[in-house]
Image (spheres, rainbow, N blue to C red):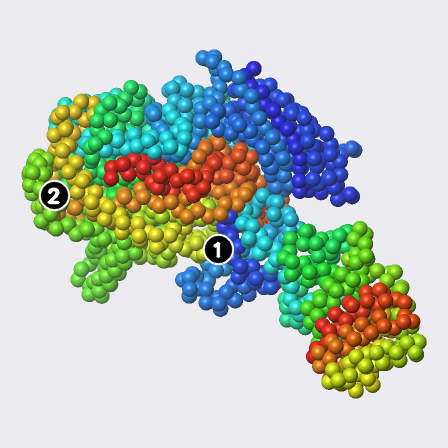
């Protein structure tokens, strides 16, 4: 009997009137946990009852403690008839189960009813006495900490990052059980809420067990989702990254702790291998699940990139023994794992060595009833298949790991699209296993690396590139190859050198499809998917070029399936990475060159495009330093050093000349306008309006180029549903409607938040769903953060100077590194600088790599695919002429360099009012420091109404419900003793209406981490580098180098 | 493409003051959008009319949802659904309970009943205030009235405590409640020149001196009802005008004191008896409810108008009233000095306030 749960019901307030005659209520409370129920006395005739109950004690297994929610029901006593329920409160007691989190849950909770919404509040105190149980075979995993945050939480240090954990549980959906026909909507909703609560508890416990097995103590980047499969059941699944975390005990410890990773950061570039690549392979494995209806397995597998001899061989060849060794080490560390995936999007410094590009996989399945909930093998197998796919894509990119990994589904009737995506990467093995090379790391402390470009270097071998890409030498260090464009699903690494500011880039796309049943439907969807992915990529690429930028972070592509259409929405944050080449412009080519007026039209368009690019460059302050031929090798005055420099570069000197021949500095990306569709595409490119001045937006944690956040934040959710006129729907009209919907939504947000200017919308998260035939629903959650414009200027200036200084130091340090290479102990040199070859780089590129990457190996698809691949080639293959100058960028001269990120000055702190609970989708609170994590918040609510008109129609209904959800989240956080929710996410918002019956129903699932934060000014300022905005340990790390 | 649903929910509830004002003023969403367009907001922000429409709808919906809480402002402070900074909460409440001068003059002293509510149409037409706004203001008056009606303790404090209003606004509401309770007539043509401020001023003096609360602070309704015993006692003042000797003596005392100091001395001397009769008769009639209601009409008829027709300057009125009240203390045969002071002290204040064009 390992735990005792104690509950006390103190009081209620603002209760609804339940007795019309007296205008009062005779309330009492039922407290239920597992199968045990206690009741308070009836507190007669009051809307503000004071029960002040005794402590109700439940003696329970810790397994139950993890699975079961505490269920509190407030009722109105009725002498003659059945007692009426006023509402319920579910309390997840998980946060009380691990030592460092909350010790007591105490506070006012909104009493919630699925039909009436919030009806008053109840004051409850909950405590848990836990007895340690060392039973090896135990089924519980109390003590494993869960974090939604997709980076190492602020007050912890990652000792080991173990890797991927996943689990799923299935059950029948109560809404679809036979009994649902005879019970009230309220009973059915409550059954569902309770079931999901139970399932999430169970899921979390099971994941915890896996973590314990891996000897971890925490799950970071925990993402739990529900699949409402309708008739076929309810799936709750979760993924996360198992870690061993060390608590940083005092604020003082904070700094040193952060530093230690920073050493590695310096080290890792040293180590570094050829890295990077930008490209997303997307290929869609398309499967139709075997349903029982299908006689034979009807599996359209799209596979996959066929690559020739990959990675390690070539690395070994060039790299010498050290690298090979390290690579081996890393690989073996990773290969032990079934899936070397990480749900993290931001990493301790040095963890991420190189980034290969986006990998994604999709699969179309037919849902079938889950016959045995205890063995959810089918669903498991589906996901295993997709993960395998992702893993092989990553391998093809010369990467042994996938970071920023996430999974999602889209369900319509019996068809389900499973998607997974992530960023292929090469990781530093140091975090991945026990018994690390701590010693070497210490040694490395003094060394420095071309920080800020290492992760861009291609990880694959350019002789065997998985896809044709256009490689150049890194504009930062000049030593390694980089691709011309980089797509990733992660946040911008803190040490990345960025020029100018970033911006939100979206690709939006709709495709009509015929209504069909079962397999036919699945096939139709499978056939459409590759085209959609291709177009989404093209759009992203075009828009990126139009912005004058060369990299995408936080890329999230969502494909939604509806009855008669598919929607694709990709969001990412575009930036200009200093290490990557300047993007070329966009060139328009007409099909019929002899037609005069047509020509004129084309040239007009061309001009417009050029103007837009120029305007955008100005808007986002993209002015990369001009590279002049003379200053090769960065500013190094001393001859001694120069000679070293030469030495270090000698290896690649031949290639430099080759490079010269093969590349244009300004390669243009050609858009061929061969039909009206293409014309419209170009037009739509130009219709995206930039945010009004003073506004920026991004979908990553922080905005590159803005570093002085002030403390005002406003998290919001906005939902829009439009009804398409069903007549003559064409793809074109559909695209336009969808595009307008998104653009108007953004415009509305800018308008609403105009009082916060200057401000930035961060973590803008769009979700599209197709609730009915002609309805499109878009849900956006984001946070607006104010920043100080003036302060920005000052710091920028300061940093320019600083970074200039630093550039020279960095170089010196850099130069020493070849020498040390030899003297260092083996394990620290995983990937030596590889020799660069340029031949392949000269091939055509600029094509969204993905399409070409997919060389298709299955028959039915092959023809079509190859034909579209050809098409793409035609379209994209362009005049890539001109030469790249063989000069070296002055390192870190960019004004917006990393330095900025690190040195955010402590934001002026604003008044914090009592009782305010902040919510943010980010992992930090600007101008404040998180002092404690109190546990995960994971809540699921259903709201239903049969008086839709009376509640203000659909808008009134949903507005009130979302406000109530926020309120319940805040109340739970406050009861845990917290004052904020970070990494907040609304994972699901399923809205269904039936205006004719005056009914509507909505399901919302939210999660986040409850935390305690303190304003920086309230703390003794530990260090100025504990930046408001960029709290990853990384940022402090960087500071050490200066 | 039509928008079925369009909402924005912030963790901190966004309040747009301008839209709030339009909502309070009772404009429909359409009118509000038109007014906002006219204000030039589109040019300033580069927004489109559709954006403005959606924004306005959204704010209106928020206000509509908040309205229920505004009916009991302490609920707004303790509720958990809308996170609103305290300064904004105060603004919401204060603006919600603010009223239009034109409107309050129409209903001041009227019974806050359904009957009056039916007249709101006419009031709306007359004042140009939207019917919706009239309803809100009327309902506010009525709500405050109902809540504080039977409470003990100071009226202003009660209003402030239960509606969290500023001191200024709470005092105004105390006056409105007091007038509504005593049904003072304020609508007569003669009284049209008086502002709400004039009445509120008088109400405050009367609450302080003429109600039960003025003598005993532990009674229910203490600030709402006039002290019946006091009104009864006022009959005793009759002697001041009924007894001819006393009246003459009073007159001579006043005239002696004011000779040479008053610009309108001769007019005063000629009118003294009329004025004094007027003021004392008002006092003696206050036992009848009907006459209580007509208090202001009487004061204007019996005192303000005669003086005004003789062009008394305000300073002379003040000198006269001071002397008129003070001289009574020298009347040996008169025994109700305290009663006189309680009556005349307040009346003097009121008269001075009422005396203007």
Q: Is residue B189 left or right of residue B53?
A: right
Residue A766 visible somewhere in the drawing: no
Q: Residue at x 34, y 52 (%)?
A: A791
Displayed quadrant of residue A395: top left
Please give the residue where the numbered disc 1 appears in the rendered image.
B2
Q: Is residue B141 left or right of residue A554?
A: right
Name the quadrant of the C terminus of chain B: bottom right
Image coords of residue B166 (percent x, y): 63, 57
Displayed quadrant of residue B329: bottom right
Residue B233 visible somewhere in the drawing: yes
Element carrying mark 1: strand
For label 1, count other residues whose C-alpha is less than 10 Å away and answer few (under 14), some (14-19) or many (20+).
Answer: few
- Between B174 and A779, the residue placed more toward the observer is B174
What is the chain letter for disc 2? A
Q: Residue at x 27, y 49 (%)?
A: A798
Image coords of residue B42 (percent x, y): 44, 64
Displayed quadrant of residue A853: top left
Labels 1 and 2 in the same subunit: no
What is the chain letter for disc 1? B
Are the residues flagged by discs 1 and 2 in contact, CB closer than 8 Å?
no
- Between A489 and B72, the residue placed more toward the observer is B72
- Between A652 and B108, the residue placed more toward the observer is B108
- Between A580 and A757, the residue placed more toward the observer is A757
Image coords of residue A327 (percent x, y): 21, 25
Q: CA distance from mark 1 to mark 2?
A: 64 Å
Please give the residue where the numbered disc 2 appears in the rendered image.
A636
Image coords of residue A178 (percent x, y): 59, 29
Looking at the rendered image, the disc whose residue lies closer to the viewer, 1 or 2, is 2
Q: Is residue A700 left or right of residue A125?
A: left
């Amino acid at each position: 009997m390992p735990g005792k749960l104690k509950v006390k019901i103190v009081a209620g307030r603002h209760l609804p009137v339940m007795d019309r005659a007296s205008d009062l209520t005779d309330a009492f409370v039922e407290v239920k946990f597992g199968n045990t129920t206690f009741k308070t006395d009836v507190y007669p005739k009051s809307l503000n009852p004071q029960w002040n109950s005794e402590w109700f004690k439940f003696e329970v297994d810790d397994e139950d403690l993890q699975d079961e929610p505490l269920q509190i029901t407030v009722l109105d006593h009725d002498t003659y008839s059945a007692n009426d329920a006023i509402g319920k409160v579910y309390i997840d007691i998980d946060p009380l189960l691990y030592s460092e989190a909350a010790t007591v849950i105490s506070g006012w909770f909104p009493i919630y009813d699925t039909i009436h919404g919030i009806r008053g509040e109840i004051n409850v105190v909950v405590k848990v006495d836990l007895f340690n149980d060392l039973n090896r075979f135990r089924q519980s995993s109390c003590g494993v900490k869960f974090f939604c945050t997709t980076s190492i939480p602020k007050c912890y240090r990652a000792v080991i990052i173990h890797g991927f954990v996943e689990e799923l549980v299935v059950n029948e959906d109560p809404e679809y059980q036979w009994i649902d026909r005879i019970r009230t909507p309220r009973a059915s909703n409550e059954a569902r809420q309770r079931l999901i609560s139970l399932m999430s508890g169970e899921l979390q416990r099971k994941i915890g067990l896996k973590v314990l097995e891996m000897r971890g103590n925490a799950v970071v980047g925990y993402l739990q989702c529900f699949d409402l499969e309708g008739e076929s059941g309810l799936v709750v699944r979760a993924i996360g990254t198992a870690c061993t975390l060390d608590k940083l005990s005092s604020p003082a410890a904070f700094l040193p702790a952060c530093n230690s990773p920073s050493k590695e950061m310096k080290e890792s570039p040293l180590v570094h291998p050829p890295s990077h690549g930008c490209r997303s392979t997307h290929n869609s494995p398309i499967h139709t699940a075997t349903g029982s209806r299908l006689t034979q397995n009807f599996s359209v597998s799209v596979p996959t990139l066929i690559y020739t001899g990959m990675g390690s061989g070539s690395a070994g060849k060039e790299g010498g023994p050290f690298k090979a060794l390290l690579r081996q080490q890393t690989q073996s560390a990773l290969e032990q794992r079934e899936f070397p995936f990480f749900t993290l999007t931001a990493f301790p410094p040095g963890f991420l060595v190189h980034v290969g590009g986006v990998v994604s996989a999709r699969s179309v399945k037919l849902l079938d009833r889950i016959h045995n909930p205890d063995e959810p093998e089918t669903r498991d197998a589906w996901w295993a298949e997709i993960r395998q796919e992702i893993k092989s894509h990553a391998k093809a990119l010369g990467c042994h790991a996938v970071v920023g990994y996430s999974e999602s589904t889209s369900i319509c009737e019996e068809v389900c699209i499973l998607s997974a995506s992530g960023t292929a990467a090469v990781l530093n093995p140091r975090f991945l296993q026990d018994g690390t090379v701590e010693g070497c790391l210490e040694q490395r402390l003094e060394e420095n690396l071309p920080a800020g470009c290492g992760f861009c270097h291609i990880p694959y071998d350019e002789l065997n590139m998985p896809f044709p890409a256009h490689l150049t030498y890194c504009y930062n260090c000049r030593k390694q190859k980089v691709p011309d464009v980089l797509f990733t699903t992660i946040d911008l690494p803190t040490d990345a050198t960025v020029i100018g500011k970033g911006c939100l880039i979206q690709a939006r796309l709709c495709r009509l499809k015929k209504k069909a049943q079962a397999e036919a439907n699945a096939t139709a969807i499978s056939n459409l998917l590759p085209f959609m992915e291709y177009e989404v990529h093209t759009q992203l690429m075009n828009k990126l070029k139009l912005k004058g930028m060369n990299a995408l972070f936080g890329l999230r592509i969502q494909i939604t399936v509806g009855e008669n259409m598919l929607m694709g929405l990709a969001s990412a944050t575009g930036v200009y990475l200093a290490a990557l080449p300047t993007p070329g412009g966009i060139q328009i080519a007409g099909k019929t060159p002899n037609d005069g007026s047509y020509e004129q039209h084309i040239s007009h368009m061309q001009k417009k495009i050029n103007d837009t690019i120029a305007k955008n460059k100005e808007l986002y302050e993209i002015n990369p330093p001009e590279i002049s031929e003379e200053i090769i090798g960065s500013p190094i005055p001393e001859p001694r050093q120069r000679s070293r420099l030469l030495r270090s570069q000698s290896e690649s000197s031949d290639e430099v000349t080759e490079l010269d021949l093969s590349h244009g500095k300004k390669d243009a990306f050609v858009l061929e306008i061969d039909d009206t569709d293409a014309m419209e595409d170009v037009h739509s490119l130009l219709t995206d309006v930039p945010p009004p001045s003073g506004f920026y937006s991004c979908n990553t944690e922080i905005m590159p180029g803005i570093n002085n956040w002030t403390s005002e934040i406003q998290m919001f959710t906005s939902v829009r549903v439009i009804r398409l006129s069903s007549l003559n729907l064409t793809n074109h009209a559909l695209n336009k409607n969808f595009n307008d919907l998104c653009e108007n939504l953004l415009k509305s947000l800018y308008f609403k938040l105009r009082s916060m200017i200057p401000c930035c919308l961060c973590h803008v998260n769009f979700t599209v769903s197709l609730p009915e035939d002609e309805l499109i629903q878009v849900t956006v959650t984001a946070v607006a953060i104010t920043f100080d414009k003036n302060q920005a200027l000052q710091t920028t200036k300061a940093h320019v100077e600083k970074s200039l200084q630093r550039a020279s130091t960095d170089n010196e340090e850099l130069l020493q590194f070849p020498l040390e290479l030899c003297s260092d102990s083996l394990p620290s040199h995983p990937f030596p600088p590889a020799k660069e070859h340029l031949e392949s780089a000269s091939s055509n590129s600029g094509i969204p790599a993905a399409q070409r990457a997919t060389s298709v190996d299955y028959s039915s698809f092959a023809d079509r695919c190859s034909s579209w691949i050809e098409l793409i080639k035609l379209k994209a293959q362009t005049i890539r002429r001109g030469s790249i100058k063989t000069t070296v960028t002055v390192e870190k001269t960019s004004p917006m360099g990393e330095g900025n990120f690190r040195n955010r000055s402590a934001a002026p702190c604003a008044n914090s009012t009592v009782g305010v609970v902040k919510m943010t989708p980010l992992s930090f609170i600007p101008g404040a420091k998180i002092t404690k994590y109190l546990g995960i918040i994971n809540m699921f609510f259903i709201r239903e109404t049969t008086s839709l008109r009376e509640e203000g129609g659909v808008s009134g209904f949903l507005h009130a419900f979302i406000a109530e959800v926020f309120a319940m989240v805040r109340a739970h956080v406050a009861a845990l003793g917290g004052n904020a929710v970070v990494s907040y996410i609304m994972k699901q918002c399923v809205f269904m209406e039936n205006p004719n019956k005056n009914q509507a129903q909505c399901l919302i699932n939210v999660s986040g981490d409850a935390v305690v934060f303190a304003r920086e000014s309230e703390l003794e300022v530990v260090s100025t580098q504990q930046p408001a905005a960029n709290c990853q340990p990384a940022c402090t790390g960087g500071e050490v180098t200066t | 493409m039509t928008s079925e649903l369009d909402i924005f929910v912030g963790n901190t509830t966004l309040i747009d003051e301008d839209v709030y004002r339009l909502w309070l003023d009772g404009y429909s969403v359409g009118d509000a959008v038109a007014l906002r367009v006219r204000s030039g907001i589109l040019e300033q922000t580069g927004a489109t009319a559709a954006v403005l429409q959606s924004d306005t709808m959204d704010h209106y919906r928020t206000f509509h949802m908040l309205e229920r809480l505004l009916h009991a402002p302490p609920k707004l402070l303790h509720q958990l659904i809308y996170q609103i900074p305290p300064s904004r909460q105060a603004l919401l409440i204060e603006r919600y309970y603010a009223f239009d001068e034109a409107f309050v003059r129409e209903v001041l002293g009227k019974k806050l009943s359904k009957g009056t509510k039916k007249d709101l149409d006419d009031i709306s037409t007359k004042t140009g205030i939207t019917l919706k706004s009239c309803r809100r203001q009327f309902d506010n008056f009525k709500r405050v009235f109902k809540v504080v009606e039977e409470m003990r303790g100071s009226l202003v404090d009660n209003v402030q405590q239960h509606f969290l209003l500023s001191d200024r606004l709470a005092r105004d509401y105390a006056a409105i409640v007091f007038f509504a309770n005593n049904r003072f007539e304020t609508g007569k043509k003669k009284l049209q020149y008086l502002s709400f401020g004039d009445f509120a001023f008088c109400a405050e003096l009367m609450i302080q001196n003429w109600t039960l609360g003025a003598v005993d602070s532990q009674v229910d309704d203490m600030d709402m009802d006039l002290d019946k015993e006091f009104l009864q006692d006022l009959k005793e003042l009759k002697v001041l005008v009924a007894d001819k000797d006393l009246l003459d003596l009073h007159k001579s005392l006043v005239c002696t004191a004011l000779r040479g100091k008053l610009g309108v001395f001769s007019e005063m001397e000629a009118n003294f008896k009329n004025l004094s009769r007027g003021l004392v008769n008002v006092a003696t009639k206050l036992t009848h409810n009907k006459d209580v209601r007509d208090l202001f009409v009487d004061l204007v008829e019996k005192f303000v108008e005669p003086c005004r027709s003789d062009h008394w300057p305000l300073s002379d009125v003040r000198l006269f009233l001071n002397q008129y009240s003070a001289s009574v203390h020298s009347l040996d045969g008169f025994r109700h000095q305290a009663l006189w002071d309680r009556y005349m002290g307040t009346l003097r204040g009121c008269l001075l306030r009422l005396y203007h064009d």
